[in-house]
Amino acid sequence: MIRLVDVTKVFKTKDAVITAADKVNLTIEDGEIFGIIGFSGAGKSTLVRCMNLLERPSSGEVYLDDIQLTKAGHKKLLEARRNMGMIFQQFNLLEQRNVIDNICYPLEISGVGKKEAIQRAKELLKLVELEDKQKVYPSQLSGGQKQRVAIARALATNPKVLLCDEATSALDPLTTKNILELLKHINKKLGVTIVVITHELKVVEQICDRVAVMSQGRIEEQGRVDEIFLNPKSQTARKLVLPGGTDPINAPTRDYLRIVFDGQSSFEPVFANIIIKLGIKLNILGANTEDIGGKAYGQLLIERPKDNDVIKIKEYLESINITVEEMIIDKEQPA
């Protein structure tokens, strides 16, 4: 288990003081895949580096199981770091070493014998499906293959935790999907706790059990991925979840209803019933569907009709257990 208690990280420059993490409290349970999502500059990468003390927090406490890393001595900290593998956006492979030697590198540092290290590396190459690439150099690999090697290297020391810092941001959508499927397989097969740092909602939806939404160094909300999708409470979460981003189809002056349905309710002819049975015309502002934990979810934004029609729509949707929320845009705020 990873636990952060009031973790703050401040960077001081010549011209400014930047708080990258601001009194963050998080608990990540053993064996889960936990996402930390936010836009650029939210403090996500700094926070994940505080977990293994690559960045030492300015204040607060970091625990791995019952070890308080922020007070651990050098030897204890090194032992803890061996239990926390890390993969990066740019792979960070050693170009002068071939694939198997890249994977062996952390084992060499840990004092593992060459024969044992090579055997472990071969096992990991099989796990990441690159058995035929042992003697190939990084320059000869695709981006997805490089990330598979980086994952194998991060697993070399049998860590309990795998920290993934924007691990799929440099990859195309199909390769991203394949890498995420690999991480899910590793989580299930090895029981490794995985922490995913990303700015992409689809990454969180595909792989994570729970997620924390981060902005300006703070955790704005956290919970199960489906809960955040169904009912985003913070401004950042709404920007991530709503189709079209910040405001529905760039229409910030329009009030709207957000209708959310899961795979079961999607078989109901909801919108046909609203139009035909209730006699209400709908102006659709945006829509999308998502796969969250293998279950289909969808949402539709419609321009808010007159008050009596809103009541009818809400009563109908609530009667068939479909989530609906009303958003009133503050007309006093600039568009």
Image (spheres, helix red, strand yellow):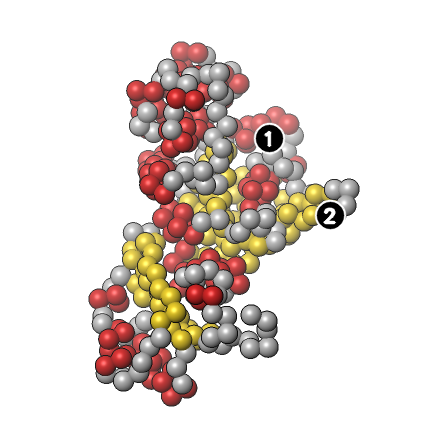
What numbered label is drawn on residue 77? 1
Residue type at mark 1 is Leu
How far separated are the C-alphas under marks 2 and 1? 28 Å
Left or right of 190: which side holds 332?
right
Residue 255 percent location from the top left of the image? 46, 76
Residue at the location (60% across, 34% down)?
Answer: 54
Question: Closer to us: mark 2 or mark 1?
Answer: 2
Residue 226, image x and y in percent?
38, 58
Q: Amino acid at mark 2?
A: Val
Which numbered tag is attached to residue 17? 2
Q: Secondary structure at mark 1?
A: helix
User: What residue is at 45 percent from the left and 49 percent from the top?
Assistant: 200
Q: Residue at x 46, y 16 (%)?
A: 97
Instruction: Give the quadrant of residue 9.
Output: top right
Q: Is residue 294 left or right of residue 162?
A: left
Q: Between residues 108 and 284, which one lies in front from this camera angle?
A: 284
Query: Please, is residue 255 above or below residue 54 in the view?
Result: below
Q: Nearer the viewer, residue 85 or 190?
A: 85
Q: Residue at x 36, y 85 (%)?
A: 309
Q: Residues within 10 Å of mark 1 (few under 14, many from 20)?
A: some
Indicate the secondary structure of the residue bearing disc 2: strand
Task: Please tell me whether residue 287 is drawn above or below residue 41 in the rendered image.
Answer: below
